[in-house]
């Protein structure tokens, strides 16, 4: 069958759609946010493909696998086994790295086990096990030919090495065995003569086995080598005519100190195995310890003012009395600022003392007083004791806020044993190779010089490593290091890593479903990503990609445009066919943007500001000691190629520095010299795409706080007042009004052993969440449960006479969310929807004009039309006097900004500099800026102004 045929798909908001998709093609599903793209791709096609595969397994195997529910669809024909590559981040396990996730580290372990050369970790001497014949060969190779041969060498057997004693009897025994000479502490002596050695000094004694010419007497040389190795337990010393010494060993041991190496195996190089992991940190590479500067973060404060952050700044009760006694004993007061304490006083407060201290204690009400003498444990030892004693994860997490992460002192953060780190390939240890970026490792392998034997052994392994590194480079991840923790990757990076891994697996006949693989990718890297997707298709697979990126849509074989609107207004196939056919379809909103009939206009003028937030000397991660300035009161976009340092600058450094300065946060900002602002800033808010709530109980109504005035409106009805109902009666989270059978969930969970858990409608309330008495109260003939089932649009009309409700719902409609239901579970909202709900919550607050908003790629999951609405919302925030800073690659957003900071020029170590900054036109004109090249084309293509005109702050740009 050459196509996938879906009939009668009704999952979520899909309107009983029937569609035929070509197999072995690159298919893009697009449409406005909430139109049903992910529902069709993931919740219908992928879910059914995965469900069929799992159902083919035994009941025993099924109980260990997460099973998908059967989607609401009549039939799907022509389905292949399905693999989903989503935007979720990879494992948060600290042992999981880019190298382990991609399996490249596994191949590196194999490479080092096969051709790695061990060195002594102490002396740096190369270690290798050699046969007597091989040692003889090396002695011959080292001998310089002379007219009469190769020159005489002396073969010595080291039997005593740096040990105290007189050794008179040992030398007599050697004489009896027929050995005529020994070398004692560097001097040749006869064994039949008295040797007087100092008992308390360390000595070296070597037996002289033979003196010969290695080039002339080969067989005699081999015999001498064998005798020396046997006598000295595998060691041999060669002394040439020039007096130079060379040490050889027949064991995998250092000939100097004797440290022994076991046979190298791949597991030897694993930090997840006891054979290779550093014993001090168990292979984690880090050590956590309590930081005095986090426990006492503000030296201006005294203990009484709340200097001890560890105690949440509360020092009442017994804690306060203990601290008062400590202060009194060491000669200061709880009212003394921490900065005024002597070094001894601060040390005693933090680390305790063995001095006996008198503690005067009293009950809170003053009924009882008592005294006792004892030692003061100290804030840091007390914290360490509580951290190791507690069984509460919450308490442990709470204490971890006061700890800093340091590299393991034994392995230096390299995770492996000292001996393992001394095994080298091309002069580098496996940890040093893993610390390189993907592009640097490829360059290292290209310049690798191997012997013929090593080349033969390593050929296949090197081919696999190069292949996998090449896939990472093709998906725009050449700046990542293999040692980077998987938990620190963004959703887009994690997804592209999985994509690269799948290409490396060379599977055929598979259905891949991808969720916006272009997220976090600079325009420069898009072409390579599209190439990679086509390569996956050419292997004989079908690709279904949910995407909004224009380049990716145009590169597809087949495009499905969902819509026409979102939520209840969507769920239909508006247009389908080749990109050209969709572009020509007048009904397709995507087509109108592709053809240029609709577009996001470049603003006619830019806001300017002469006041800045300045952060100087930023050096965290790959930042190259840069000074950045963010204009206050305008819309700023920070851009640059992937890995150039955008998130490090804005989140790790600026955000944390602002949090520390404004809120006295205990989180340590990235390395920088200082932070100043020319105008007052009193709030910093991050608006990301994380869910607005972690439980199904959270919904748009509760998050935006519109549910509070709705409950108030119900409480003010005549029926509610007669019954004495307060607003709390209309909450599904509180006893009284909610259905107690399902505790306000509306659903009952039934656990099934061999099948997925089943959620059934609560029989008591029939899914309404409330008890019958509460549902009898109506507002304009609708109960509270019916109101929660309304869309924002319907609720706005229902409560049009209540300004407190209407205004909040107007802001939701303003960001294009009129289609979502008030009571819709937050877990069913897309990332883009969650972010816009957060934006409306900010828009509905009273404007102070002194807030900085930080957003990281807010266009994720947004169609061209949604991006247009988002730009409008961001401009509204700026118009209210706030500062908006956005990390973004979307050119429509960049060209709509007032100020652009472009980081680069490349990713990783080649990035971390400010390449260009200024208005979009100024950045577009900068020849050094990679972003500028693409921006120039975008501004000219969209009919942008030849020159940016200034306008007053607070005037929103045209959108």
Image (cartoon, rainbow, N blue to C red):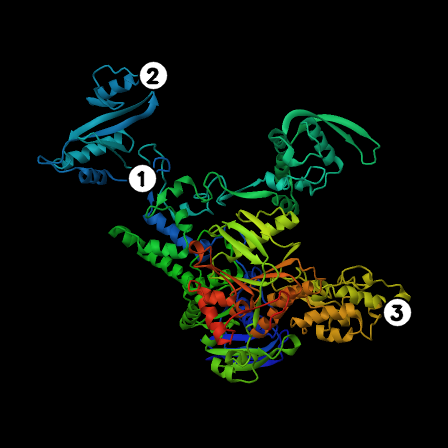
Tell which of 219 and 644 is nearer to you. Answer: 644
C-alpha span from label 3 to label 2: 106 Å
Q: Position of residue 66 (x, y in %)?
A: 58, 62
Horizontal side of residue 770 vs 754, given as left or right: right
Can you identify the residue that label 3 sits on? 719
C-alpha span from label 2 to label 1: 32 Å
Around disc 3, counting alpha carbons within 10 Å, would you say few (fewer than 14), some (14 to 19), or many (20 or more)? some
Can you identify the residue that label 2 sits on? 199
Please identify the residue farthest to the left as the structure is shown: 147
Horizontal side of residue 248 vs 12, given as left or right: left
Q: Position of residue 735 (x, y in %)?
A: 80, 59
Does any portion of residue 91 appear in the rendered image?
A: no
**What mark, if any, has residue 291 been given in the picture?**
none
Which callout, 3 or 2, points at the residue further toward the start of the chain? 2
C-alpha span from label 1 to label 3: 90 Å
Which-is-in-front pick, marks 1 and 3?
3
Q: Position of residue 583 (x, y in %)?
A: 51, 82
């Amino acid at each position: 069958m050459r196509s996938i045929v879906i009939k009668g798909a009704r999952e979520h908001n899909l309107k009983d759609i029937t569609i035929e998709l070509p197999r072995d093609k690159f298919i893009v599903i697009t449409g406005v946010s909430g139109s049903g793209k992910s529902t069709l791709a993931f919740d219908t096609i992928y879910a059914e493909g995965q469900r069929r595969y799992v159902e083919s397994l035994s009941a025993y195997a099924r109980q260990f696998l997460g099973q998908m529910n059967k989607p609401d669809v009549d039939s799907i024909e022509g389905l292949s086994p399905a693999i989903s590559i989503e935007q979720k981040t990879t494992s948060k396990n600290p042992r999981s790295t880019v190298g382990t996730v991609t399996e490249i580290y596994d191949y590196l372990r194999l490479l080092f086990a096969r051709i790695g050369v061990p060195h002594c970790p102490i002396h740096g001497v190369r270690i290798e096990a050699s046969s007597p014949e091989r040692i003889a060969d090396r002695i011959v190779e080292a001998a310089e030919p002379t007219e009469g041969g190769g020159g005489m060498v002396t073969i010595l057997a080291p039997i005593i090495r740096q040990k105290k004693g007189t050794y008179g009897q040992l030398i007599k025994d050697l004489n009896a065995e027929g050995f005529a000479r020994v070398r004692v502490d560097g001097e040749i002596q006869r064994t039949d003569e008295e040797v007087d050695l100092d008992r308390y000094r360390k000595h070296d004694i070597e037996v002289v086995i033979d003196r010969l010419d290695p080039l002339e007497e080969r067989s005699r040389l081999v015999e001498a080598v064998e005798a020396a190795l046997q006598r000295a337990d595998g060691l041999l010393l060669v002394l040439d005519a020039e007096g130079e010494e060379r040490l050889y060993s027949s064991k995998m041991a250092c000939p100097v100190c004797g440290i022994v190496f076991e046979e190298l195996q791949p597991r030897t190089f694993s930090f997840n195995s006891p054979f290779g992991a550093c014993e001090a940190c168990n292979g984690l590479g880090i050590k956590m310890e309590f930081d005095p500067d986090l426990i006492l973060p503000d030296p201006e404060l005294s203990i009484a003012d709340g200097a001890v952050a560890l105690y949440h700044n509360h020092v009442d009760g017994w804690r306060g009395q203990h601290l008062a006694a400590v202060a009194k004993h060491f000669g200061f007061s709880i009212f003394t600022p921490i900065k005024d304490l002597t070094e001894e006083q601060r040390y005693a407060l933090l680390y305790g003392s063995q001095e006996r201290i008198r503690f005067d204690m009293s009950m809170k009400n003053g009924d009882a007083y008592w005294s006792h003498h004892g030692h003061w444990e100290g804030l840091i030892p007390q914290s360490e004791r509580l951290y190791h004693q507690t069984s509460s994860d919450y308490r442990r997490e709470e204490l971890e806020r006061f700890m800093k992460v340091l590299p393991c002192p034994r392995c230096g953060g390299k995770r492996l044993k000292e001996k393992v780190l001394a095994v080298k390939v091309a002069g580098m240890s496996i940890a040093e190779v893993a610390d390189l970026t993907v592009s640097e490792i490829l360059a290292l392998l290209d310049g690798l010089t191997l012997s013929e034997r090593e080349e033969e052994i390593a050929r296949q392994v090197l081919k696999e490593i190069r292949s996998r590194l090449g896939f990472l480079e093709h998906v725009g991840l050449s700046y990542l290091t293999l040692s980077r923790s998987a938990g620190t990757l963004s959703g887009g990076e994690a997804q592209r890593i999985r994509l690269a891994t799948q290409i490396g697996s060379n599977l055929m006949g598979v259905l891949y479903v991808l969720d916006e693989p272009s997220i976090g990718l600079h325009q420069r890297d898009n072409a390579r990503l599209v190439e990679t997707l086509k390569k996956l298709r050419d292997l004989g697979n079908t690709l279904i990609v949910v995407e909004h990126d224009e380049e990716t849509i145009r590169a597809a074989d087949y495009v499905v445009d969902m819509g026409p609107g979102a939520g209840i207004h969507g769920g239909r196939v508006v247009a389908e066919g080749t990109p050209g056919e969709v572009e020509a379809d007048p009904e397709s909103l995507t087509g109108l943007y592709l053809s240029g009939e609709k577009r996001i206009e470049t603003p006619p003028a830019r806001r300017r500001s002469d006041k800045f937030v300045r952060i100087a000397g930023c050096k965290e991660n790959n930042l190259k000691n840069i000074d950045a300035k963010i204009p206050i009161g305008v819309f700023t976009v920070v851009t640059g190629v992937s890995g150039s340092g955008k998130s490090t600058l804005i989140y790790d450094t600026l955000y944390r520095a602002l949090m520390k300065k404004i809120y006295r946060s205990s989180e340590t900002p990235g390395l920088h010299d200082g932070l100043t602002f020319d105008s007052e800033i009193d709030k910093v808010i991050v608006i990301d795409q994380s869910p607005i709530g972690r439980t199904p109980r959270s919904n748009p109504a509760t998050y935006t706080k519109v549910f509070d005035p709705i409950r108030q409106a119900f409480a003010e009805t005549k029926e509610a007042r007669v019954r004495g109902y307060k607003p709390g009666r209309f909450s599904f989270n509180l006893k009284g009004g909610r259905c107690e059978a399902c505790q306000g969930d509306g659903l009952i969970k039934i656990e099934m052993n061999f099948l997925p858990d089943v959620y059934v409608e609560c029989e008591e309330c029939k899914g309404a969440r409330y008890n019958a008495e509460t549902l009898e109260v109506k507002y304009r003939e609708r109960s509270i449960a019916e109101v929660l089932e309304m869309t924002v649009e319907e609720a706005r009309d229902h409560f049009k006479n209540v300004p407190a409700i209407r205004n909040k719902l107007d802001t939701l409609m303003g960001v294009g969310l009129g289609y979502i239901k008030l009571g819709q579970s937050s877990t069913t909202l897309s990332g883009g929807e969650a972010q816009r709900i957060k934006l409306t919550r900010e828009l509905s607050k009273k404007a102070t004009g002194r807030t900085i908003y930080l957003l990281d790629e807010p266009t994720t999951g947004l169609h061209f039309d949604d991006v247009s609405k988002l730009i409008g919302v961001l401009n509204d925030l700026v118009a209210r006097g706030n500062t908006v800073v956005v990390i973004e690659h979307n050119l429509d957003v960049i060209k709509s900004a007032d100020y652009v900071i472009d980081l680069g020029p490349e990713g990783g170590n080649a990035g971390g500099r400010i390449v260009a900054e200024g208005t979009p036109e100024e950045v577009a004109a900068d020849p050094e800026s990679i972003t500028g090249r693409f921006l120039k084309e975008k501004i000219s293509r969209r009919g942008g102004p030849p020159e940016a005109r200034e306008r007053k702050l607070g005037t929103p740009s045209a959108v």
